Amino acid sequence: MKVDHIAIAVKSLDEATKVYSDLFGKGPDHFEEVEEQKVKTAIYYLGDVRIELLEPTSDDSPIAKFIEKRGEGLHHVAYKVDDLEAKLAELKEKGFRLIDEKPRVGAEGKLIAFVHPKSVVGVLTELTQDAKE
Ligand code: ZN
């Protein structure tokens, strides 16, 4: 497995990109709005890993609810796998609590699935598999 991206929940992309642009010494590489998740994101490419800042666009966004409960900060870590379906079956067998029992299609046609934070030491964990060409 490799780290694909790390997602950080923020109240304001304007404020958060100031901090992260100072930290990384460069501005965001990409902006995107994901209507289904009711978030807008600023993405930095750092080697093979993307750092995604997520700002809710609505009070009923899952990110808004997260910030309300736990404040700003680490939202999830995503790992890239070769065969998501097989990995989910393996994790289920090992007793992990899966949020998505089956892969679903995420941004850029990638397959994704989430594993419950309760079974990964408090961290919401995303597994992702690149779209097959
Ligand atoms: Zn993600």
Image (spheres, grey):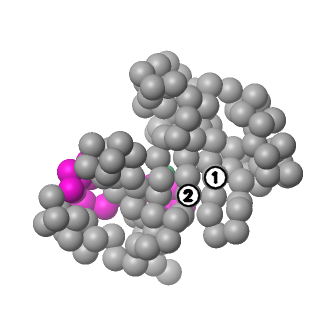
108 w.r.t. 100: above or below: below
Q: Amino acid at mark 1?
A: Ile
Q: Residue at x 71, y 62 (%)?
A: 46
> Within the image, what quadrant is residue 101 found in?
bottom left
Residue 39 in sight here = no
- In the drawing, does residue 23 fall left or right of residue 12? right
Q: Earlier in the sequence, mark 1 or mark 2?
A: 2
Tell me which amino acid carries mark 2: His
* Among the 4 quarters of the image, the one containing residue 79: bottom left
Q: Mark 2 Cα within 10 Å, few/some/many (few <14, many 20+)?
A: many
Residue 59 visible in the picture: yes
Disc 2, SS: strand
Residue that badge 1 annotates = 51
Q: CA distance from mark 1 to mark 2?
A: 6 Å
The residue located at (47%, 19%) in the rendering is: 68
Nearest the viewer among 80 and 107 is: 80
In-image side of 13 versus 112 (left or right): right
Q: Quadrant for the N terminus, please.
A: bottom left
Q: Where is residue 45? Give x, y as percent.
A: 71, 60
Q: Which residues are magenta?
A: 96-110
Q: Position of residue 34 (x, y in %)?
A: 55, 42
Instruction: Please give left or right for residue 61 compared with residue 15 in the image.
Output: left
In the rendered image, the vertical position of residue 3 relative to residue 22, given as above or below = below
Q: Secondary structure at mark 1?
A: strand
Q: Nearer the viewer, residue 36 or 80?
A: 80
Is ligand 1 less than 8 Å from the beta carbon at label 2?
Answer: yes
CB within 8 Å, label 1 to label 2 = yes
Q: Which residue is mark 2?
A: 5
Count of picture labels? 2
